[in-house]
Amino acid sequence: MHIKLHLVPIILSLLFVIVNAGSRFVFTLDASASDSNPECFYELLDARATQNRLLFRYELVQGDNFDAVNAFIQTPTGRIAEKWDYSKTGHIALQVRESGLYRFCFVHAGISSQLSVLYAFEFLLAGSRTFTVYPSRAITKGTEYDVSASLTVATSKMQESIGLMSFSFAGVSPSIVDPKTRIYLSLSVKTANISKLELISLPSATLPAEVIWMYLEGAPKDSTYTQHCESGGIVVFDITDIAVDTIKKQKPTLTLAIFSYDVGFAELYSMSQVAADHWPLVTFEGLTIVENHSYITLDVGTTLWIEMMQFRHRVWDLKGKIGVIVQHERVSHYAAQSANTRLIYVGVIINLVLIGMGIAQVYYIQQWLNYY
């Protein structure tokens, strides 16, 4: 659609907010910052898009060779997202699902009374969530049992269990989807020892286990979606095609199965004993603004913003690696200075010893001559 001229300033400011929010400064870390009383900074994040990146970097800019810090990132629900022990620098890019206050904390772990630390943070968003569908059912389906406390994928020589999810699309109008809208299924991984997860759409959630197993075995590989999986991470599937098909055919329910061809297991969060941010969620996302209480979708594809976000991610990672190199160079410089200083001290001591030996020999000869 064509964008009205009076909306251009709003659009530009909105795109700036969507793509980037962050802070950068240098602070002094006192020796009083301990494990029980760390120095913390807070960042308010609104994870309103599945495609996001929390970028964080710190670096010790002034301190002794034996100075370092302990650092960690804590989510709004109290989970430690990442931590570093006795390090001069650290950087990371995280995909997050929780909205709220994130804590970025530091503990003094050096010998100097004060440390100067660079703090850098950015939060990138590619798009904005316009509609969310929560699961009506999320269980582990085994060969002989069903468990609702988690979604567990287990495979040995054959499929032992899969994750089964149902989402109600009853009443969802096809007008909610336009060519620029992407639809994602996002899952939070609790623990895993497999590297890939597969996703497939099932015709019904009430199929017997043996029928589902036969369906998975007979399904062509191009009908499944594959994503990387790791413990503590997030798995995001782009299900736009099957979700749009469900909506257009006015099917009341979208049923999805998560499984793996790899031997091992993966436990994902379900709907029990976890915040709703970590539930299996289907989200409709695009770039939108609101005018006169109605949504207007911008004529910009989400894919472009994802590529921009990934580029910023790579630049951030490069800065972090440069910081590591700088710290190693400083350590090498300090070590060289220390070695040079030790050599000077040793040289002075050796010269003093030689002078002392010379004086002792002169004194001995003089005493010997006077005796004879």
Image (cartoon, helix red, strand yellow):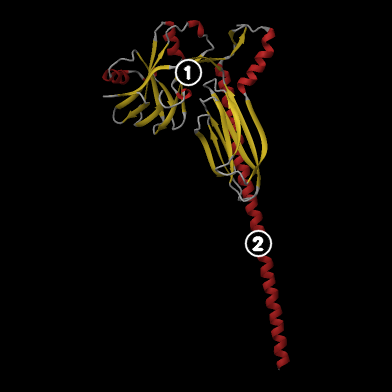
Q: Which residue is mark 2?
A: 343
Label drawn at residue 150: none
User: How many residues crowd around disc 2 within 10 Å: few (fewer than 14), some, or many (20 or more)?
Assistant: few
Task: Name the front one of labels 2 and 1.
Answer: 1
The percent coordinates of residue 14 (x first, y second) are: 64, 17
Frontmost residue, 106 versus 248: 106
Furthest toward the front, the residue is: 36
| Looking at the image, residue 172 lies above or below residue 123 | above
Instruction: From the viewer's side, name the closer residue of 269 and 261.
Output: 269
Tell me the number on the disc at residue 184: 1
The image shows residue 284 at horizontal and vertical percentages of: 50, 14
**Quadrant position of the C terminus in the picture:** bottom right
Occupied quadrant, residue 9: top right
The answer to whether residue 102 is visible is yes
Residue 315 seen in render = no
Question: Residue 192's quadrant in the figure?
Answer: top left
- Whether residue 63 sits left or right of residue 197 in the image: it is right
Q: x, y percentage for residue 86?
A: 55, 45
Q: CA distance from mark 2 to mark 1?
A: 63 Å
Q: Amino acid at mark 1?
A: Tyr
**Residue type highlighted by circle 2:** Leu
- Please say if 370 is above or below 214: below
Q: The N terminus lies in which quarter of the figure?
A: top right
- Point 45% across, 10% down: residue: 244
Figure check: 21 above or below 323: above
